[in-house]
Image: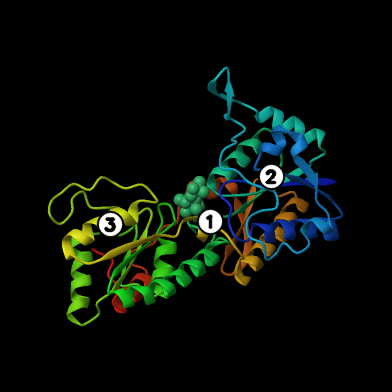
Amino acid sequence: MPPTIRSIGISTGGGDCPGLNAVIRGVVKAALLDHGWRVIGVQDGFDGLVWPERTRELDHSSVRGILSRGGTILGTTNRGNPFAYELVADGKKVAKDFSQLCIENARKLGIDAMVVIGGDGTLKIAHDLSKLGLPVVGVPKTIDNDLSATEVTFGFETAVQTATEALDRIQTTAESHHRVMIMEVMGRDAGWIALWSGLAGGADVILIPEIPFTIESVCSKIKEREQFGRTFSIVVVAEGAKFPPKDASGNPIPPPKPGSVGTTLAHSIREYTGKDVRVTVLGHVQRGGTPTAFDRLLGLRFGVHAADLIARGQFGRMVCLRGGEIQSCPIEEAIGVYKIVNPKSDLIRTARAAGVTFGD
Ligand code: F6P
């Protein structure tokens, strides 16, 4: 028997991602038009459940014109875990458990079920809240595309498009100055953004966490290009790329942190080749701005299907894309199971056949 639902809550947690607003629109439109529910926007992840004044009702006008907007109209945070909420008391950092408060506040707000949009961290919290009695359904999001439960996450295509356009621009200045240009991209421990944008943008070297590389191999590609009169080279490096312990001269390379991965690589390439090297860290540019049509559509489909899961009482589940269709799976199944690049996949084969070096 389907549950009686009058109002649902919706929140976005973790790092933002292009397409979040499309999901919000899909949920709100389906809730109002299809199911006749009220929708309460819970702001900044779960913060709105800790402080109910940070909630607001969402109606048709709230979601008007938001499909093309990046970010999230609800705000987000990658802090604010209600099970260990960090506060400063008497000048000291303390962690408080506000989980029961969230359950009580949800009840007081009249929230019968919640749609939680987030990455694995946010979905894990949602799952834990559901065990305390708050019915939830999940929507996966990340530009990194590293969740194994879904074929693709919205936001990934936009990030790849942005990185590819940046590479197109880097290419022309690299050629003019006969330089090695390194572009560092995001992706945590997965090389999807580096691989897709590197291939689409015609990179000569792509370094991803899944394929260990050596400085010698990277530099011999650059030198080989020189011999053929190609006096510039483009290197795309994923922020999670695993550096060799030593450079070509035997000097230790301390594992760099995201944001300084490109610079560390530049230092070694400069030493080894004597070439002029420049670095671009694309950073949060990849996360901002207008989502592609594909990401908007996937977001909308996820949103509408999340509302359908609630209507059918299928709580504790997450929407996902499988075989091009929107399906669902238990949230538990999706948490902590990462999808990384298979070094034997056709994409890697395509790249190698097209002359790309992975530095191995
Ligand atoms: O998971 C998305 C992501 O953009 C990663 O690619 C990146 O490592 C991280 O978030 C950056 O997080 P923050 O916005 O906290 O710097």
| Sequence-wise first label, 3 or 1 | 1
User: Does residue 82 appear to the left or right of 187 in the view shown?
Assistant: right
The C terminus: image quadrant: bottom left
Q: Secondary structure at mark 3?
A: helix
On whether ligand 1 comes within 8 Å of the CB at mark 3, the answer is: no
Residue at 84% in and 51% down = 37
User: Does residue 78 appear to the left or right of 226 in the view shown?
Assistant: right
Q: Check disc 2 and report the residue beneath it.
A: 136
Q: Is residue 134 above or below residue 314?
A: above
The three-letter amino acid code for the residue at tag 2 is Val
Marking on residue 10: none
Q: Check disc 3 and report the residue beneath it.
A: 265
Rendering colour mode: rainbow
Q: How many marks?
A: 3
Marking on residue 149: 1
Whole-Å distance between the Cαs marked 3 and 1? 33 Å
Is residue 214 something one can see in this rendering?
A: no
Whether residues under marks 2 and 3 lie with C-beta atoms below 8 angstroms apart, the answer is no
**Residue 312: horizontal and vertical position, in percent?**
76, 53
State which mark lies toward you, 2 or 3: 3
Whole-Å distance between the Cαs marked 2 and 3? 44 Å
Residue placed most toward the observer, 5 or 352:
352
User: Does residue 187 appear to the left or right of 204 in the view shown?
Assistant: right
| Sequence-wise first label, 2 or 3 | 2
The three-letter amino acid code for the residue at tag 3 is Leu
**Residue 180: horizontal and vertical position, in percent?**
28, 68
